[in-house]
Image (cartoon, helix red, strand yellow):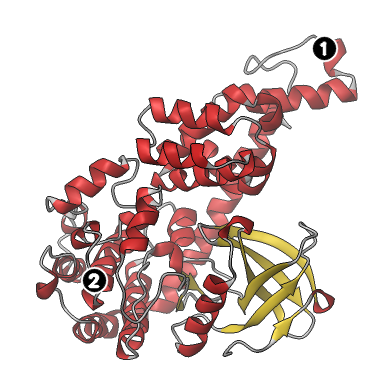
Amino acid sequence: MLCSEKFGDEDLDQWTRIAGGGFGTVYRVRHQEKGFVAIKLLHQNTGSSDALRKEADCLKKMSSPYVLSVYGIYEGKPPHDNTEQQGIVMEFMERGSIHTLTTDLDGPPPLPLAVQLVYQVALGMQHLHSNKFLHHDLKPSNVLLDKDFNVKLADFGLSRVTASVSSNIQQSTEGTAGTLHYMPPEAIDLNCKATRSFDVYSYGILLWSIFTGKEPYEGKLFELVAFRIQKGDRPDVSLLLEEKNETKNKMVELMTRCWDGDPNKRPTFNDIVDATKRLFSVHKDGIGAAIQEVLSKLVHNQSQRSSQYHQTNVAASDPSSTEGNAVPNDIVDHPRFAAQQTSVGFGSRNLTEQEKTTFVDDRRDYIIQETTDAMAIAKELWEMGMIHKEMYSSIKANKKNEDKMRALFTTLRQGNTVKAAFYDALMKHNPKMLNS
């Protein structure tokens, strides 16, 4: 067993949820000796712990400056759920992922830092492929960043030496469209055998995401995306070409080679490392200034969001406000009713799509546990065309309401539009839970 070191509850405290995905939930946890670590727990309905141990072993085998380090296996009862669970204990990445970076920046990172990111991802992928490993799920949320914005590849839940990708496609047909957006057209064929060119295609889409700060095909339905990818559609590069910037022109040239419809025409990661290394050498001296620019913008954006959040809650609880459901002053003056009014004001006011998305993302676990009518919500999304028939049937097949909700949450990876529609359906069918 590669990951022989065991971690128990006696050395761990300060559990904070930081992310959730198809395989499990990730927590930041303080370890008495190592400081803060990340612990990834399997969802209870994923069954065997083989997948978790496999991922831990993959990470351990692939030790590299550009691959996330794994410390061992957690076995214990986390404070938020007093049941026996297992998890992977990994190094904690202070800066989140490329996905969180572009989200927090509201756009792409400065050019020198973007070039460093794609160069380091290429080095990490070159390392995996040289060791005869495929990643199978290369996308912004699986590229983590340390405190200095250096890259660490993560989430090897689908990695393998060589195998059919049918299981990956099956997951996509069940709603993991975020993964579909980074998958090559040949992967739509369930008989396809995964090769290195699979990861190269994903890298090309990742390049586009980094340099635009956007998600590909955002808000588009699963069936349409799958159909158009097979027909040769790719993300729009026109915005990158408008600036007449030589580096961006070369990046567009590289990404279009990577996402070529013919796998045999895609470059290898040896080729990609050579190409990105040349561009990295041009921008290397500007990386320090780029990081300072990013840090300043992150602080500014966080300050703005905090200010907007404060103003929103003040407006929602203000009895004189015309927004929301105003009530007589004598009722609002009573603390109990004032608290209720604040809650109703928040739930009933017109949130933006991004606010609804943030609300759903931040409260995933609570919503799954507390929502009482998953099928009503699923049916509404199905009737709106937000989820496809197979996914609706899959949700319906689950016996427990909580499992239905967990399956329903996988459809939300299609983008903010679907998450906003989910929020609206949640407000319609479970307003008391949402307002609480």
Q: Is residue 218 visible?
A: yes
Query: Marks 1 and 2, how far apart in space?
Result: 68 Å
Q: Residue at x 36, y 61 (%)?
A: 168
Q: Is residue 29 left or right of residue 419?
A: right
Q: Is residue 254 left or right of residue 97?
A: left
Looking at this view, name the residue that lies furthest to the top.
328
Q: Amino acid at mark 1?
A: Asn
Q: Position of residue 81 (x, y in %)?
A: 76, 57
Against 87, residue 312 (above or below) is above
Q: Residue at x 44, y 60 (%)?
A: 99
Q: Which residue is mark 1?
A: 329
Q: Position of residue 386 (x, y in %)?
A: 38, 34
SS of the residue at dot 1? helix
The crowd level at tag 2 (other Cα within 10 Å; few <14, some 14-19, many 20+) is some
Q: Which residue is mark 2?
A: 193
Q: Is residue 353 left or right of residue 345?
A: left
**Dividing the picture into quarters, in which one does residue 166 lie?**
bottom left
Which of the numbered marks, if any, corresponds to residue 211?
none
Q: Nearer the viewer, residue 418 or 44?
A: 44
Number of dots carrying numbers: 2
**Dividing the picture into quarters, in which one does residue 269 lie?**
bottom left
Q: Is residue 349 left or right of residue 181?
A: right
Q: Is residue 352 visible?
A: no
Could you tell me which quadrant the N terminus lies in?
Answer: bottom right
Q: Residue at x 20, y 69 (%)?
A: 251
Against 349, residue 279 (above or below) is below
SS of the residue at dot 2? loop
Q: Amino acid at mark 2?
A: Lys
Against 422, residue 241 (above or below) is below
Q: Position of residue 299 (x, y in %)?
A: 57, 58
Q: Position of residue 436 (x, y in %)?
A: 74, 32
